[in-house]
Amino acid sequence: MTLIGLRERLRERNLHDASPATSRKHPPPEGERYAVARTVDGKFNDLENPTMGSAGMPFGRNVPLEYAYPENHQDIVERPNPREVSRELLTRDAFKPATTLNLLAAAWLQFMVRDWFSHGKGDWHSAWRLDLGEGDPWPYGDMKIPRTPEAPRSPGDTSPPAHVNLETHWWDGSQIYGSTQEFHEIVRSRKDGKLRLDPDGSIPAGLLDQLAKEPGWWIGLALMYTAFAREHNDICDHLCSQYPYWSDDDLFDHARLINAALMAKIHTVEWTTAILGHPTLQIAMRANWWGLATEQIHNLFGRISKSELISGIPGSHRDHFGVPYSLTEEFVAVYRMHPLIPDYFDFRSAGTDQPLGEHSLREVQDKHVRGILERTSMTDLFYSFGIAHPGEITLHNYPRFLQEFKRPDGEFMDLAATDILRSRELGVPRYNDFRKLLRLRPVESFEELTENPVWAEEIRRVYKDDIDRVDLMVGLFAEPKPEGFGFSETAFRIFILMASRRLNSDRFFTTDYNARVYTQAGLDWINRNTMATVLRRQFPGLRPSLRGAKNAFAPWPRVQTAEASR
């Protein structure tokens, strides 16, 4: 009940619109598919405000707009220098594992992030430039960080700069289906509603090369893309058996709805409960989907109440809480969780647990992904991720390879310094101001910020004894975590607000989450499937490790242990 009350207060005070007033004007597309199916670019989810949440619309804010102005140029690049923050406070000194999770949790999060938001590749012509301190080992000349382009604004507009989301803001599987017509056409087979995959279920070479051109593509994304592209095609086969007269578009539209909802359910009741292991959160996140009436009651009787509290958000009344829906800059900021990624990957056989080779993070990125997929089976790769741990989200645990990250265009970046600079550039308040705006008490000393006295002194030195200048990400990584939490309580404030909002505002999770739109076969598919059932169906060789698994994002037993327990 405390969490419910907190969420209500955040809904009242921490949702702010940054979209232009012209967003309501848009002609409907030809035909009537948009009324019962997701559009490519996210338009017409809200039929009265058709561009709400669509690709190209600005991010909203979780802080009042008067607090959302970017810092001045000197503060962005100097106070303190983001490169100094990266080197002194974030660099991984030794890998700190998150032992309650497996590495699939890290891959899944980036898979979801690809669905939710993108500021684009940035503008190199007006890039930020960071000074390099004495003894800095950076070997690539000037340190540049591309500037985030601003959304167009009317003459005389004095509101804070807004920045557009190139993905749709909706939870709609756009990391698979695309947010542009061009990508959409690349992935569709145009036969039986299916996505384009090779006969063995792998990503076609041409598409794989296309995906590798995007910064941040790595083997973890390839695993998730493959699993849920296959899942889409299996859903198509199931629907075709039920509705043999349906067209290619009918099958595709329904399979996309079902697959996207299944991914949203997995994130809500499995990934979140894995990374937030507190007993109260186990109940609360399941209640988000099924209500306090529980999954068992839902499976027996369906919805027993119009209330989202009793019967969950899916199928309830849609509600924007007085503010047009969008994801927010603050939501993006708290999901900067690169410490989850290890620097090295140990691939092992799913059948014997025998080693297949160790690879650095750099060797499992962009163009190297294709070679790994040719040499190593998907079953072995998933098994290797299932038995490995991600990193803990904390200071001194940022992957070193990401501090010398080579983009597909050949440019090198320190992503840790970039994360720090981005929040300043985009007007996300620093840590103490952020806490105040979320109705949390600001910390008064470095010793209060962190329980680690060595860290407290390091942060004091970097921030010149000014606690109010501590960057948001540094504060989030330094503060003590509540019992069972994989990330900070401050970040959790944004999470508890926005996790529900993504469902509440989407008509395909609320008023149109029904058998008329999804079909009963589709709703049944969502209800009976989990991450574990998806993996067991798509990769049967994983069944020994997943036998009896309550949560596929928790560490799996190694093959010998699984076999011995039969």
Image (spheres, grey):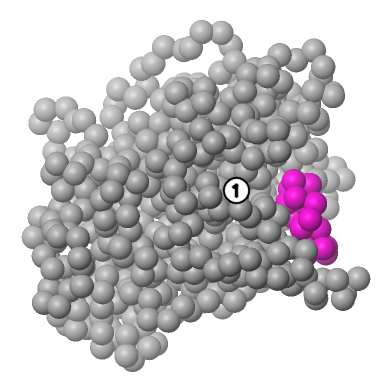
Residue depicted at x 31% and y 37%: 164
Tell me where the magenta segment starts and ends, as one range: 532-548
Q: Residue furthest bottom?
A: 453
Mark 1 nearby-residue class (10 Å; few <14, some 14–19, many ≥20): few
Residue depicted at x 64% and y 33%: 197
Residue depicted at x 38% and y 88%: 452
Q: 84 left or right of 237?
A: left
Front-most of residues 125 and 360: 360
Front-most of residues 292 and 534: 534
**Residue 219: image x %, image y %?**
53, 53
Q: Mark 1 — residue? A: 374
**Residue 447: image x %, image y %?**
31, 87
Q: Residue furthest top?
A: 30
Front-most of residues 412 and 259: 412
Quadrant (top left, top right, bottom left, bottom right) of the C terminus: bottom right
**Above or below, comparing residue 7 to residue 279 in the picture:** above
Magenta span: predominant SS is helix
**Residue 45: image x %, image y %?**
52, 27
Residue 80 in magenta? no
**Above or below, comparing residue 105 to residue 87 in the picture:** above
Residue depicted at x 19% and y 84%: 461
**Residue 327: image x %, image y %?**
41, 43
Front-most of residues 269 and 320: 269
Q: Is residue 446 visible?
A: yes
Q: 540 left or right of 173?
A: right
Q: 67 left or right of 290?
A: left
The amino acid type found where label 1 is placed reads Glu
Quadrant (top left, top right, bottom left, bottom right) of the N terminus: bottom right
